Amino acid sequence: MIIAAEFSFNKGKELISKKYNYLLEEIKEIISSIDASKCKTKKSKEKTMPGRMLYNPKVLNKEFKKGFISKNWQINIREKCNYSTNYYVSEYKPKSLNDGAFREMDFIKDKLGVEVQFGKYAFMVYNVCAKMTIFNKLDYISMGIEIVPVKNFADMMSTGVSYFEQIVWDLEHRSVSDIDIPVLILGVDS
């Protein structure tokens, strides 16, 4: 795989290159080591492309996981969620609330967080604008990297997969908030 595009959110590229250049180099090695052709395992059942072989996001995620494990990154770091009942109206009594709920970061090393997103559109912006901010506030990470496909690559997956151009548009039009952390968005292609 290749890095086809980069977007610096809240000075993410500049600050990560300065503080975490050694980890950025590891991430580039991981991306370039992935043979995307091995991940084209999903036979489409969609009406618009029946029988077409597509890149399988689950297989791609497994390849990324192998790569990060090989470089000694922590994987699937979880923070348990203890949801509050303080905001329910007095008549409402929930049956079950805190039964195993958690938030999870894909990869962390030396306080740099990485999320790999080959899923639905809403998760990209959530990762950058909510999850990474939460993990920063909890002192797991100081900066983040979001790895997503560029549109060209997403077009060779099932419909609805998010892509680089979407998140860049959203973040440019949203702009930076005072709670946002530096994030580098990497757009990858096969």
Image (cartoon, grey):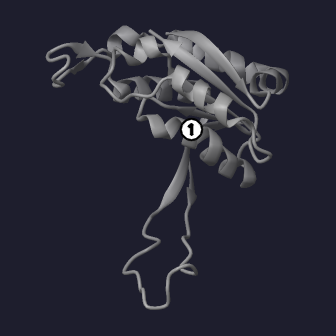
Does 78 appear above or below 151?
Answer: below
Task: Where is residue 162? Give x, y as percent.
Answer: 45, 28
Q: Report which residue position mark 1 lands on.
A: 125
Q: Quadrant of residue 146?
A: top right
Does 97 appear above or below 127?
Answer: below
Q: Residue at x 36, y 15 (%)?
A: 155
Q: How many marks?
A: 1
Does 15 appear above or below 126?
Answer: above
Q: Quadrant of residue 145?
A: top right
Residue closer to the observer: 111 or 132: 132
The answer, for residue 75, to whether it is visible in the render is no
Task: Where is residue 9? Give x, y as percent.
Answer: 72, 29
Q: Residue furthest right?
A: 18
Identify the element where label 1 is drawn: helix
Question: Label 1 amino acid?
Answer: Val
Is residue 60 shown left or right of residue 6?
left
Q: Residue at x 69, y 47 (%)?
A: 133
Is residue 69 shown left or right of residue 51?
right
Residue closer to the observer: 109 or 125: 125
Is residue 44 shown left or right of residue 114?
left
Q: Residue furthest front?
A: 173
Q: Quadrant of residue 165?
A: top right
Is residue 148 shown left or right of residue 19?
left
Task: Where is residue 116? Give x, y as percent.
Answer: 52, 30
Q: Residue at x 78, y 26 (%)?
A: 16
Task: Where is residue 37? Give x, y as percent.
Answer: 35, 8
Q: Residue at x 30, y 14 (%)?
A: 40
Does 166 appear above or below 5?
Answer: below
